[in-house]
Image (cartoon, rainbow, N blue to C red):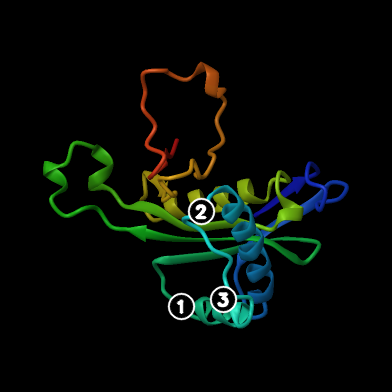
Amino acid sequence: MTQRCGAGEGCGQMAEVKVRAVRPGDGAGCARAWLDAARYYVELDPENFQLPAEAGLAGWFEQDHADGSQTVLRLVATVDEQVAGFVAAVLEPPLPGAQWQLTRAAASPRVYVNALMVAERYRRAGVGTALMAAVEQWGRSGGAVLAASAAAPSCALEIRCQTNTPPSARNPRQKRNSRFPTRRFR
């Protein structure tokens, strides 16, 4: 999957964002994005976030990427052959006892996004959007009807989904669950 970007300072003049499966050697780029995100989150909420140790982090990602599970999606986005961000997601089966659940989605597979990280210099350049579009495509192909992610309850961290409706025009009575944001596939 390829997307053009031009908004981020690290993205350059209409650089191309390419999304692909992780492969050996991507660990260092993933570690850079992870550390950039950690610095951002620690600044927002130092009580719940920490700066991970840099030593061995790239190797940790390499080892994690070597897991060839078919239910785990691991993608990187690159700009000019450099890792600009990554996403890790799982395809979860329908919930047991779905017939007793209130939501229809409980009876369908769901995508759960465990991590979406974009290196600071590539933020606001379409990298996260390109990664999430690939996750949604993967989820749909596996029968998923929605994607969810976890966010820290103490700070309003969540994946911001693309929408044509500005926040001010949304239903004010509709409560948003910032702990588990979801996006229904269209």
Q: Looking at the image, is mark 3 or mark 2 nearer the viewer? A: 3
Identify the element where label 1 is drawn.
loop
Q: CA distance from mark 3 to mark 2?
A: 19 Å
Mark 2 is surrounded, within 10 Å at the Cα level, by few (under 14), some (14 to 19) or many (20 or more) other residues, namely many
Based on the displayed image, in which of its 4 quarters is residue 90 positioned?
A: bottom left
* Residue beneath disc 3: 61
Q: Looking at the image, is mark 3 or mark 1 nearer the viewer? A: 3
* Residue beneath disc 1: 68
Q: Position of residue 96 (x, y in %)?
A: 16, 55
Identify the element where label 3 is drawn.
helix
Mark 1 is surrounded, within 10 Å at the Cα level, by few (under 14), some (14 to 19) or many (20 or more) other residues, namely few
Residue placed furthest toward the right: 13
- State the quadrant of the C terminus: top left
Dot 2 amino acid type: Val
- Identified at 41% across, 70% down, the residue is 70
Mark 3 is surrounded, within 10 Å at the Cα level, by few (under 14), some (14 to 19) or many (20 or more) other residues, namely some
- Identified at 68% across, 67% down, the residue is 32
Q: Earlier in the sequence, mark 1 or mark 2?
A: 1
Identify the element where label 2 is drawn.
helix
Q: Earlier in the sequence, mark 3 or mark 2?
A: 3
Q: Position of residue 64 (x, y in %)?
A: 50, 77
Dot 3 amino acid type: Phe
Q: CA distance from mark 3 to mark 1?
A: 13 Å
